[in-house]
């Protein structure tokens, strides 16, 4: 029972790490990466649709993204969505393809991006703490209902704390990597 609960906890914490990494991929580093714009929501015939479903996104050069829509009629909507996004990028098109130059980041902008990474990491750690709290409540409930002994409860509590610490360290490592990527650009 405790093993199952801890395995379920690992699964939840892995999902928290995956969600964090997905959020961090959208933060600009000064290099062109299709992940920057894949999740930009485009109003496609009245339906909000992720850009990656509407176009082929590629990075032919380190400072340039190209977006080739499957439907050339959606060029204008894609441009508007990019302009409205928080990316601060200005698209240009030739009627068939959108070019999105990625300017070098200023030092001030790099610091802002690094701060944004730290915020997202902290949000991720809050998620980990919430998972830990819920599992701890379940463990207390098991002990209260005499499903586990007091020793088993404390052993499981220690394992849970170790698990939480491991995942928090993973988040710190991800943070360090992303901040280094941003600051070196």
Image (cartoon, rainbow, N blue to C red):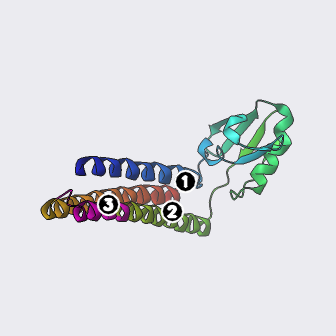
Q: Are marks 1 and 2 in contact (CB under 8 Å)?
A: yes
Q: In the displayed image of the protein, which residue is found farthest to the front?
A: 145
How far is disc 1 from disc 2 in space, using C-alphas? 8 Å
Residue 57 occupies which quadrant of the picture? top right
**Residue, disc 3:** 138
Q: Which residues are magenta?
A: 133-148
How far is disc 2 from disc 3 in space, using C-alphas? 27 Å
Viewer can see residue 52: yes
Location of residue 22 in the rendering, given as x and y in whole percent from the top left corner: 53, 49
Q: Nearer the viewer, residue 67 or 84?
A: 84
Viewer can see residue 95: no
Residue 172 occupies which quadrant of the picture? bottom left
Q: Nearer the viewer, residue 44 or 103?
A: 44
**Circle nearer the viewer, 2 or 3:** 3
**Residue, disc 2:** 120
Q: Name the residue located 37 percent from the left edge and 62 percent from the top edge.
A: 134
Q: Name the residue located 72 percent from the left edge and 34 percent from the top edge.
A: 55
Q: Is residue 78 above or below residue 169?
A: above
Q: In the displayed image of the protein, which residue is found farthest to the left?
A: 151
Q: How many marks on residues?
A: 3
**Residue, disc 1:** 23
Q: Nearer the viewer, residue 132 or 114?
A: 132
- Classify mark 2: helix, strand or loop: helix
140 in magenta = yes
**Mark with earlier residue (2, 3):** 2
Location of residue 135 in the rendering, given as x and y in whole percent from the top left corner: 33, 59
């Amino acid at each position: 029972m405790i093993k199952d609960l801890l395995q379920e906890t690992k699964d939840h914490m892995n999902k928290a790490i995956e969600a964090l990494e997905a959020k961090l991929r959208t933060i600009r580093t000064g290099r062109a990466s299709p992940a920057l714009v894949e999740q930009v929501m485009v109003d496609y015939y009245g339906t909000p649709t992720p850009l990656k479903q509407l176009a082929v996104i590629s990075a032919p050069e380190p400072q340039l993204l190209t977006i080739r829509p499957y439907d050339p009629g959606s060029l204008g909507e894609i441009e508007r969505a990019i302009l409205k996004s928080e990316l601060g990028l200005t698209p240009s098109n030739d009627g068939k393809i959108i070019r999105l130059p990625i300017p070098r980041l200023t030092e001030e902008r790099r610091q802002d991006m690094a701060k944004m990474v730290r915020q997202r990491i902290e949000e991720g750690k809050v998620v980990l703490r919430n998972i830990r709290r819920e599992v701890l409540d379940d463990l207390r409930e098991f002990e209260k209902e005499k499903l586990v002994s007091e020793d088993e409860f404390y052993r499981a509590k220690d394992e849970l704390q170790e698990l939480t610490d491991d995942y928090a360290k993973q988040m710190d490592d991800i943070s360090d990597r992303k901040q280094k990527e941003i600051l070196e650009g």
